[in-house]
Amino acid sequence: AEITINCMDSVQLTPSLIFPTGNYFILFEPVYKKYTNIALASFGGSVKTSFISGNLVYEKDQSNSYSGCSPNGFNQDKLTGKIAIIDRGDCEFGFKALKAQEAGAKAVIIVDKQQSYSLISPAAGSYGAQVKIPVIMITYKDGTYLKNLLSSSGSTKVSLGFDSRSLSVH
């Protein structure tokens, strides 16, 4: 049997590849790869009852940095409706996410700057209460892979969320 989940991008589900149960982050295009080593932020929107899908974007902020710490934020035309990749460092996690949200991002993926496998849950800081979009952190290695893939392919689609049961994706 096939199940179709309707959202911004439809996903056809078949019994070939298994979603991890619980929190997940999946790269769909241009290649398939699932990530289970993610850390959910202690603030922002929840993906506990659904998932969010979209194109990744890795853009510099108004200070010409990938850290997302510019007081002037990001160029809105670059982030609107996309999932923003932002590098860790230089300011609070909540500030980075708020600036991405203000520029129209629908989710934020923070890339750790340490080459470690263990992750921390990004803390809200002074601005996190204003953030309504989902925020996760991924490892330096996974983030570097995604940034390189985005640079070489031009278009990268992902999904992040939570699933309390095992589902299959084709």
Image: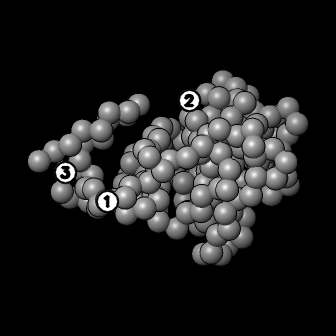
Residue 159 seen in the current view: no
Mark 1 highlights which residue?
A: 165
Tell me where residue 88 sits by quadrant. Answer: bottom right
The reply to whether the C-beta atoms of the residues labelled 2 and 1 are less than 8 Å apart is: no
Residue drawn at the location 54% of the way across and 54% of the way down: 146
Q: Which mark is residue 14?
A: 3
Circles 3 and 2: CB distance less than 8 Å?
no
Residue 165 quadrant: bottom left
Q: In the image, what residue type sits under mark 1?
A: Arg
What is the residue that sits farthest to the left in this orientation?
1
Amino acid found under the numbered disc labelled 2 = Gly
67 or 42, nearer to the observer:
42
Drawn side of residue 79 relative to residue 123, left or right: left
Looking at marks 3 and 1 on the same chain, the residue that comes earlier in the sequence is marked by: 3
Disc 3/disc 1 C-alpha distance (Å): 14 Å
Query: Which of the two labelled residues, at mark 3 and mark 2, occupies the earlier sequence position?
Result: 3
Does 141 sit left or right of 75 as displayed? left
What distance separates the C-alpha of mark 3 from that of mark 2?
28 Å
Task: Please state which of residues 35 and 39 is positioned toward the viewer in this rendering.
Answer: 39
CA neighbours of label 3 inside 10 A, class few (<14), some (14 to 19), many (20+): some
Residue at mark 2 = 81
Q: Is residue 111 left or right of residue 48?
A: right
